[in-house]
Image (tube, grey):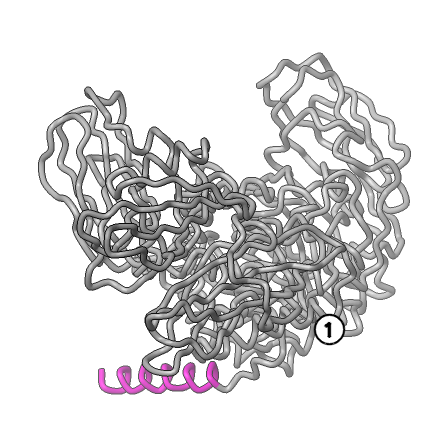
Amino acid sequence: MNRLLLLCIWTSLLISSVVLAQDNTQRGSRECSSKKSMAPYTPYLNDSPNTPRHSFNVLNYKLDVDIRNCFLSPYPKSFSATNEMRFRVDTALSSITLNAVNTSLTIDSVKLAGTSFTHASNILTINLNRIYAVGETTAVKIFYRHNNVSDNAFYVSSGMVFTDCEPEGARKWFPCWDKPSDKATLDLTAKTPATVKLGSNGRLADSTTVGDTTWFHWVSRDPISTYLMVMTGKVNYGLDILYWHKILSPNDSIPIRFYYNIGTPPTAMEQIILPMTTRYSTLFVEHPFEKNGFAAIPSGAGFTWGGMENQTLTSLCSSCWQEYYVSHEYAHQWFGDMITCGTWADIWLNEGFATYTEALWHEYTGGYTLYKSDVVNDANDYLSGNPGWPMYNPSWAVTTPDNNTLFNYAITYARGSAVLHMLRYSLGDSLFFAALKSYATDVVNFKFGNAVTADFITKISQVAGQDMSWFFAWVYQANHPTYANSYNFTNLGGGQWQVAFRASQTQTNTGFFPMPLTLRISFTSGADTTFRMMNSVNNQVFAFRFGRQPTALTFDPNNDIIIKQGSTTIGSTLATPTLVSPPNGSPVFVPVTLRWNTVVSSATYELQVAQDSLFSSIVIDDSTITDTLRSVTGVANTWFYWRVRAKNGGGTSLWSPKWAFIPPMDDVTEHQGIPSAFSLDQNYPNPFNPSTSITYGLPHKSHVTLTVFNMLGQSVAVVDEGEREAGYHDVAFNGNGLASGVYLYRIQAGEFVQTRKLILMK
């Protein structure tokens, strides 16, 4: 028992020392991009989602391949095989079409539901024995041969056989519907010499050896995109197997197989892979497959560098048993394999995520500083290598581009990672990681399926509790913002100072990029103050008032908007902020009150409302300010700059400039009756200081918990809790004791849960 305990302690220390000793300046993403972008691939003529027309859904490929002679001198590339393909009919049909490259594959015959075929222009058309109706399931069996040709998909070299197919090479070693959107399970039997070890997707169902021949039978219960289907075998392969114990079921484990070349064992990676599996499982979702594995391929076999994330069996170059390779390729088992891009236009959902996960791994092993170094390096790699196209190109969903374009490092990898970092900054850690976990655990829409960019935006918006489509300008637009910000300080007298800041983007080669901006203001005395506000339109001006003298303003002090250029300088034309209204009433983080907080006995007030720098004036009393703002402007749900001064017998006070949000009429109309459904209204006023009102509706008596959280997900106040009658309920929330900032408030009433944001500005 003591020896076992000492062994566990020694192993833990060894894992820690290996992990922390890794060099974070090397990135698996760079090697992955180099490997894929340099691989020869030419898009197929007339190949699109409608050519061939996809009117069926492949459910399973059952492949039986005789590759025994491929391992023996003179190492031919030819083999014979069958493909029994089961599919469900989506549109009534009497024939199906598959991808099958003529120069690589020769079709001999078809059976089962297939009666005859034609094979031309890389398309295999199979005529069926009758017309099949929507929803029916049937199967065809294809007898075919792989020709003795080099086709950059099926590789043979001196006792080594492997496949490597991204983006569309599977059609060179078996007939298939070769697009990432049609996932299917796989049943593979491969005949080899008895001296060979061969791996594939899924689990090893059995292996049978008779004399000098072995049949390996691999079965994947989980669906796979065709480009991720693989077989990798070698004479005298080394094989180590580790077991990772599941987090949720510690008594259950999955095997992780390491196929290696004799003399180069994967010792270092075997010490890292178990904690890496645990970390990725904790961040995203528990390891989703029934096994995993890695296979090193000798350099002379045609796999010279980098890796390829085949589902549950990653291919690695012969000298790639290193953390930075594996942290990237292994991340693909979650993003790329478990959730696969729906089209090649969405490839950033694979590669950008895997690149960003490398940084998350470094954050785990070495802290936030190493993480930030990674994502800043990604941003710099993008800025120095930007070819000028966006991450999402709709034409790629129709015609697959060449590999050098599809796997461009600056765009697909580096920018993808940097954009995910900026999404983390925009949402805050709590919401960001909750969104990633919700994305990965969504068994209805994503897990073991596909995602397109619009799907991902919808998921992020659902978790964030707001429409996040504005953020994804970073995905749909090319290039990046060039800021030419300006600011000034104005002495208002009486110890009062105004800081005005204009957020300006001057790029001409792309559109505007909305982003939350952070400003740090320093003063002659006291601590710095940091503000965060939403910059929703160009040349937006924000004004702040302080009772001490400001000395400096720093834009984006933590370099959170890591993809940007430009400068922030002192300007001279910002004394009066110009009104700019955010779209859709999006909250802007600025000093706001709908009441003038200077008490003047028996006073009236002169109010001026600015729209596009044009002021209109009206004399009112304090109690009617809110209604007057709405009536003067004639517009609701909009931001306006306004200023007010008191007028009484003792004279007139100084102007008190402010920003105010004019709420929609519905926001200030009392609800009546019993609601038909649960609801949680936006708090009013918002932003607020220090109190705000929150209204919620209950269709029936319910136990209610209304809680306010900070952006780290920590509860800071329980606003309301207990049994509440059906109807509308108004509760007050006081932010005294809390720092200025963005907070979340969430209601739980039975199974109903909804979250919104509120903004406290002092």
> Residue 507 or 448: which is nearer the viewer?
507
User: Which residue is nearer to you in this view: 624 or 142?
Assistant: 624
98 inside magenta stretch: no
Give 452 or 628, whichever is nearer the viewer. Answer: 628
The quadrant of the rendering that contains the C terminus is: bottom left
| Along the viewing direction, whichever of 35 and 110 lies nearer the viewer | 35
Tag 1: Cα neighbours inside 10 Å, few (<14), some, or many (≥20)?
Answer: many
User: Is residue 553 found left or right of 300 in the rendered image?
Assistant: left
Magenta segment: 1-20
Q: Which residue is mark 1?
A: 298
Q: Position of residue 603 (x, y in %)?
A: 23, 48
Q: Residue at x 81, y 61 (%)?
A: 39
Whether residue 112 sits left or right of residue 39 in the image: it is: left
Three-letter code for the amino acid on which mark 1 is drawn: Pro
Residue at 70% across, 57% down: 192
Q: Inspect the magenta stretch and tell me whether residue 11 lies in it.
A: yes
Name the magenta segment's main secondary structure: helix
Is residue 538 positioned above or below 452 on the image?
below
Q: Quadrant of residue 491?
A: bottom left
Residue at far left of view? 723
Where is residue 99 shown, x and y percent of the image? 79, 37
The answer to whether 479 is drawn above or below residue 227 in the figure is: below
* Residue ID at (87%, 32%): 119
